[in-house]
Amino acid sequence: MNVLAVVVASVSGRAAQVERTIREMTNDTWNAVDRYFTDLLVQADPALDAAMEASEAAGLPGISVSPCMGKLLHLLTRMHRVRTILEIGTLGGYSTIWMARALPADGRLLTLEADPKHAEIARSNIARAGVSHLVDVRLGPAIETLPRLEGEGASPFDMIFIDADKPSTPEYFGWALQLSRPGSLIIVDNVVRSGAIVDQTSRDASVQGMRRFAAMLASEPRVSATAIQTVGGKGYDGFALALVSSRL
Ligand code: SAH
Ligand code: DHB
Ligand code: MG
């Protein structure tokens, strides 16, 4: 390595370190603010806490929605007087419980999960939360379980939360449209991916999936949509929200 290369390497090494430090500081602030609002606004719920603990103890990945995002799903359910919900991607049922808690006594939540272990933990978490009578955890790859729903009379759903394997999001959004009615809400998690969504050359299948989904959303005449960036305990991500307006 020549002298110039060494200098460049050491300067860019320092730059990378500075960037890392800034990122860590920013993350600390995001976390502190997320915790601040969670402590103030998100009522303690022993069953939700227990669901998180049991999921972690079982080795499930820590990718449930944040408490504030769970509360948002809960509020949307109540605000929109939602009675029927479809969730794609259950994990340990944390988001499921948040939404089920907002349903009326005759409400119904169908949640699709491909991983048997996740489904098992979710069922136990959902039972502990006392909402089993409202929730049906359906095991299997969503692309196989989705086509059956219309035939069994489960649709249309008032609200659909898409939060499973990210590369398949465009297909799930297509199904969400199929299984909705004018007035239904469709919420899609993880549309920002630390900003990678704007990288059109990204080779990450999740990012490409979300970009294809965003293009669908933009050109879909049946919905009116927005997307919101989020920061906090789960880093930098975001969600899209679409209101189904009319049938073609
Ligand atoms: N909604 C949950 C988090 C879901 S994480 C919460 O916020 O609490 C994503 C889940 O999707 C994982 O449990 C994963 O096993 C599941 N998943 C992945 N691929 C899937 C597929 N093809 N069909 C159904 N579920 C899938
Ligand atoms: C991942 C999935 C999620 O649903 C999420 O909210 C965060 C991360 C993931 O697969 O990495
Ligand atoms: Mg998610």
Image (spheres, helix red, strand yellow):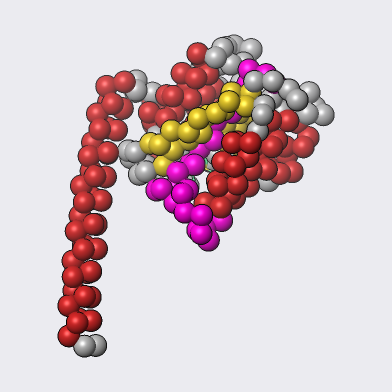
What percent of the width, then of the height, locates residue 44? 34, 23
Q: Is residue 24 magenta?
A: no
The image quadrant that residue 29 belongs to is: top left
Looking at the picture, does residue 43 appear above or below residue 216?
Answer: above
Q: Is residue 185 magenta?
A: yes
Between residue 97 and residue 205, name the one nearer to us: 205
The quarter of the image holding the N terminus is bottom left
- Residue 10 in view: yes
Q: Is residue 172 left or right of residue 144?
A: left
What percent of the width, then of the height, locates residue 236? 37, 43
Looking at the picture, does residue 84 appear above or below residue 58?
Answer: above
Q: Is residue 198 left or right of residue 164?
A: left
- Residue 164 in view: no
Looking at the rendering, the stretch of residues picked out in magenta corresponds to 181-205
Q: Residue at x 73, y 39 (%)?
A: 145
What percent of the width, then of the height, locates residue 103? 56, 16
The quarter of the image holding the C terminus is top right
What percent of the width, then of the height, locates residue 160? 61, 28
Q: Residue at x 47, y 54 (%)?
A: 199
The image quadrant that residue 20 belongs to is: bottom left
Q: Residue at x 29, y 33 (%)?
A: 34
Between residue 222 and residue 142, name the one nearer to us: 222
Between residue 159 and residue 125, name the one nearer to us: 159
